[in-house]
Image (tube, grey):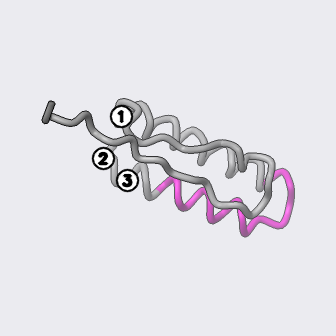
Amino acid sequence: MDLNYVFLRQQVERSRSNASVSEAARKAHRELARAYEREIERRTGGRIVFSNSHAKDAGTEPLISARPSPSTSS
């Protein structure tokens, strides 16, 4: 799977979670989105991480934090 595809799937699952009427559907889509987020974090070696402080807040978008690359200048 291409990393861009994983990002796409994560966004689709977050959108579906926000649009879901039932709590069961919201939970299922949140869990799928989180699985894609973990895959993104794994593939980027932790350079991109998703904050999970929003996990219990319905309708809140995840925060993405890109960790800066180590500086080559000393």
Cα distance, mark 2 to mark 1? Answer: 10 Å
Pick whichever of labels 1 and 3 is earlier in the sequence: 3
Q: Amino acid at mark 1?
A: Arg
Q: Residue at x 83, y 67 (%)?
A: 21
Dominant secondary structure (helix, strand or loop) of the stretch shown in magenta: helix
Q: Nearer the observer, disc 2 or disc 1?
A: 1
Query: Going by the image, does 31 lie left or right of 43?
Result: right
Residue matched to label 1? 43
Image height of 14 relative to 44, above or below: below
- Asked if disc 1 and disc 3 are in contact, CB closer than 8 Å, the reply is no
Count residues near mark 2 (Cα–Cα under 10 Å), then give few for <14, some for 14-19, many for 20+.
Answer: few
Q: Residues within 10 Å of mark 1 (few under 14, many from 20)?
A: few
User: Which sits in the foreground, 9 or 54?
Assistant: 54
Looking at the rendered structure, the secondary structure element under dot 3 is helix
Give, as a single range, the part of the protein colored magenta.
9-25
In percent of the image, x 71 and y 61: which residue is there? 60
Amino acid under label 3? Tyr
Q: Position of residue 48 (x, y in %)?
A: 42, 42
In the depicted structure, whether residue 74 falls above or below residue 6 = above
The residue positioned 86% from the left and 55% from the top of the image is 23
For marks 1 and 3, give the one nearer the viewer. Answer: 1
Q: Which residue is mark 3?
A: 5
- Identify residue for label 2: 2
Q: CA distance from mark 1 to mark 3?
A: 12 Å
Q: Are marks 2 and 3 in contact (CB under 8 Å)?
A: yes
